[in-house]
Image (tube, helix red, strand yellow):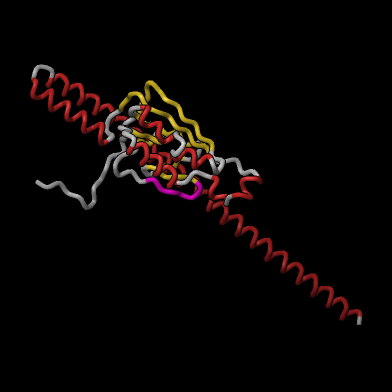
Amino acid sequence: MIKQTEALILGIMCLILTIGICVQIKTVNISGTTTNSNKELNNLKTQVLKMKEKCDEIYEKIDVSQKELEKIRKNVTSNDEALKVLEEKINNYNILSGFTDVKGQGVRITLTDAVMTNTLRNLYKDKDLIIHDRDLFLIVNELKISGAEAIEINGQRILENTAISCDGNVVAINGEKVSSPFIINAIGFPERLASINGADGYLRELEEYGIKTTFNVENEIIISKYIRGNKFKYARAIK
């Protein structure tokens, strides 16, 4: 009987020891997997940062080259009226296409997500209390209708083919992620652009949902050019 008891105790101890070893091996494997995952993630982050640095360097070189080209064009056209007219057309096309820095009078609009209070949550859904891509699109469209000649949102120049879309909890503009507060600069005749801030303007509608808006007329607004470049996959010029 004593031997049977000892055997039973020994068996239980072996079982416990086996379970302990298995748990320890599993823990080591998980730890190793986590370590490898962290290494891979850090490597990817490093590669992304390096690529971004290279892109920034290329864009800086492009900017310098464009400025040098502009100086050359001015020197060439300074004594030729026909070339002066051509130069003016090029400048106008660059403004319209967004490929040159511009400045002028206009307006600055700031939009900030609503503070999630119990009162607002009882009245609206949470998704109604934040700024979406649709809101920015409607504001840009209203500014264009009011005669805005150049628009940017959080430093992103708005072109004719600029995509504004939701990307998780943020908004993507020209492929760049931006978030609240949204600062919208628009160059144009302030009195006409002010229609967006009127009684029937879209800003009033946003304020009903607790979204904070500010509207300021500015004597000079500077909007940077779009430097990422456009690539057309399907459209081709007719020769």
Look at the image and say whether residue 168 sits in the magenta stretch: yes
Pinpoint residue 92: horizontal percent, then vertical percent: 21, 30
In this view, 22 is above or below 200: below
Where are the magenta residues, as a range?
Answer: 164-169
Pinpoint residue 50: horizontal percent, then vertical percent: 40, 39
The reply, left or right, for residue 87 in relation to residue 138 is: left
Residue at (22% x, 52% y) in the render = 234
Query: How many tags in the picture?
Result: 0
Q: Residue furthest bottom?
A: 1
Q: Residue furthest front?
A: 199
Residue at (67% x, 66% y) in the render = 22
Pinpoint residue 204: horizontal percent, then vertical percent: 49, 38
Residue at (49% x, 36% y) in the render = 111
The reply, left or right, for residue 216 in relation to residue 56 is: right
The chief SS type of the magenta part is strand
Choose between 86 and 39: the one closer to the eye.
86
Location of the N terminus by quadrant is bottom right
Q: Residue furthest top?
A: 79
Q: Residue furthest right?
A: 2
In this view, 22 is above or below 100: below
Among the 4 quarters of the image, the one containing residue 194: top left
Pinpoint residue 174: horizontal percent, then vertical percent: 36, 42
The reply, left or right, for residue 164 in relation to residue 233 is: right
Choose between 35 and 108: the one closer to the eye.
108
Residue at (49% x, 43% y) in the render = 131
